[in-house]
Image (cartoon, coloured by chain):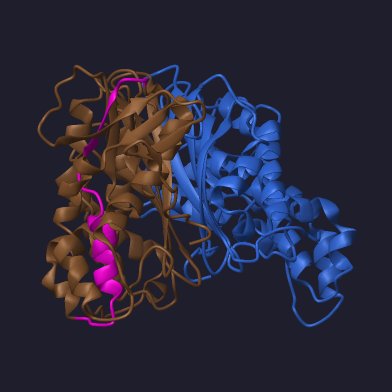
Chain colours: A brown, B blue
Amino acid sequence: MEYTGPTIFELGENQALKQALSVFKPVESTLVGSGDDAAVIALGDPRFVVTTDTLVQDHDFRLDFSTGYDLGFKAVASNIADVAAMGARPIALTVAMVVTRDTTQAWLEDFARGLQAGLDELAPTAEIVGGDLAAGKQIVIAVAAHGELLAEPVLRSGAKVGDQVAIGGTLGKAAAGLALLMHEDRTLAASYPELVDVQLRPTPPIELALSVSEHATAMMDVSDSLALDANRMAKASEVGIDLHSSKLFGYQAVLELAAQSINSRGSAQVSEVDWVLYGGEDHSFLTTFPQDFVLPRGFKAVGEVVAAKEPVVLLDGKPLEIKGWDSVSS
Amino acid sequence: MEYTGPTIFELGENQALKQALSVFKPVESTLVGSGDDAAVIALGDPRFVVTTDTLVQDHDFRLDFSTGYDLGFKAVASNIADVAAMGARPIALTVAMVVTRDTTQAWLEDFARGLQAGLDELAPTAEIVGGDLAAGKQIVIAVAAHGELLAEPVLRSGAKVGDQVAIGGTLGKAAAGLALLMHEDRTLAASYPELVDVQLRPTPPIELALSVSEHATAMMDVSDSLALDANRMAKASEVGIDLHSSKLFGYQAVLELAAQSINSRGSAQVSEVDWVLYGGEDHSFLTTFPQDFVLPRGFKAVGEVVAAKEPVVLLDGKPLEIKGWDSVSS
């Protein structure tokens, strides 16, 4: 997408923000929205959850792959997934932005529309309640997302030996989409729009996560990889997490053709198995439940919590290599 | 200050964060701190306030002027000033950071100590409850700060004709400090350590602001300049704000020697009057009170709220030029 017209720099911060902010829809829980020193948010309960996550140009996204709209949507999705993973309903987000000297106002407004679209689709109870706009060498998007608890928070540390391990959402699609986008054959991405869409605008099943929050013993969003995030849960809960490869076949199957298309085109070899185990950014929900809990549609059992001397992630009983996205070293 | 030892990049995100986080002290309102998908914060009242502000390397700070410690302190101070300006007690902050490939772990830990020192000195009821560390071309510090309301929020829009206008804190010192730091004669800054300190580590009087929050009709923190921020308040309240130059003399007097020192050294001429009216970053509290309210020690009357057809800032009854810091265009 080409963005034309004046830059944010030409308009100045106040004018630029005024136009971009007009996109946002108010929600009931916002007592005071943007425009004062701080926003004021009402809760149903005197506790709130807060999380923050950052997207950095050329590290976490590329402007030739993502439109402003895509990035707004993704910034919302990745942050509210963390809120929902605590068992909290998203209610308010702040967005601190660094833009560059040549970032256009048209890009900023497309970004704002993407933020609102992410809320409309994934968390209509939430509002963009504040922000900050600064200038720098590359675009940086730092979101803080807030939620209200529906019951007790669902921590990573609650997984119990014997629990079922389940996934709500997709696995590996975002990584496959990224591999398609990065391939030198630019026609490839167009052949697998669903995978590319998950990379550009992930859609974590927020309502699904909230619907099970009273039953889940542990929950977290898979942002860096199934292996890495399961390892974090295993450590926090001091358990082993044994994944069953037969239960992962379904996630791999939908990626197989894309992997074959990439592998048939040259030297860089990819694997749908790796995408499922080691790909990040789907923002699905890794969840543990008591053994007798009947999983609702949308959750899929992928393994079980086992006793272990040291926290460990296993695949069919054998230690799994732990790797994935490290936001500093990657 | 020289920082040596391994870079954050060499250590990796997890190890780097683990060491830096050990600096932070827990507070009672944090039910779940960093380490899960989100933090959980307890409030005395089912409302919270949230604000976000960003510091960008080479726009908002320079690494040859500020140590990591200074920047941590300033990031806390500037954000909790916004929280306190709402009449809310700071309780929780998240810090999203972009660091560069050559940022050392020693710098990060000094930054973390500065964050905690800012809380210790200005807001001991608050904790750093979460963060995010990413890699990029320049250091970016995006803080989101949260507070609990003590009573009704104090908005910018409540100033009433006849109110007294008062300042809690300093005016112009941060701008003077910046001018001293930027001067080619590097010995100058050392002659005025108090002014430089306000620029590097501002100390907004948080408790003072909270102590008057039930009496103030309007309050905001002066981050961009007295003129610019008074203009924002005038607009929000639909009033005129008439500043009295005789009441600003005291702020100018303490800056006069520094201005003379700079002006005696060459071509760039500065003015203590400009620093007071147009300098930002002191993070003092611009506050309006009913006429009969007796200002507590620490607040100083600087003018009055007057009727006006259009929102306006006056100096001795004449329109004041509105200028100050624009975080995008500056």
Tell me the quarter of the image containing the N terminus of chain A. Answer: bottom left
**To which quarter of the image does residue A15 belong?**
bottom left
Specify the segment rendered in magenta.
Answer: A160-186
Determine the residue positioned at 67% across, 39% down: B118
Is A142 situated above or below B80? below
Q: Can residue A79 be seen in this view?
A: yes
Q: Where is residue A75 in the image (x, y as percent from the top left)?
A: 32, 53
Q: Where is residue B180 in the image (x, y as percent from the top left)?
A: 78, 65
The number of callouts visible is 0
Relative to B328, is B169 on the left or the right?
right
Relative to A73, is B249 on the left or the right?
right
Determine the residue positioned at 65% across, 43% down: B20
**To which quarter of the image does residue A104 belong?**
bottom left
Is residue A183 a member of the stretch shown in magenta?
yes
Determine the residue positioned at 71% across, 58% down: B6
Is B281 situated above or below A59? above
Q: Camera-side residue: B201 or B7?
A: B7
Is residue B169 a member of the stretch shown in magenta?
no
Relative to A71, is B23 on the left or the right?
right
Is B28 situated above or below A102? above
Q: Where is residue A184 in the image (x, y as percent from the top left)?
A: 28, 82
Q: Camera-side residue: A118 or B205?
A: A118
- Extreme residue in the left direction: A297
Determine the residue positioned at 53% across, 49% down: B242
Q: Where is residue B31 in the image (x, y as percent from the top left)?
A: 48, 21
Is B164 situated above or below B325? above
Q: Can residue A66 be seen in this view?
A: no
**To which quarter of the image does residue B273 belong?**
bottom right
Relative to A324, is A271 on the left or the right?
left
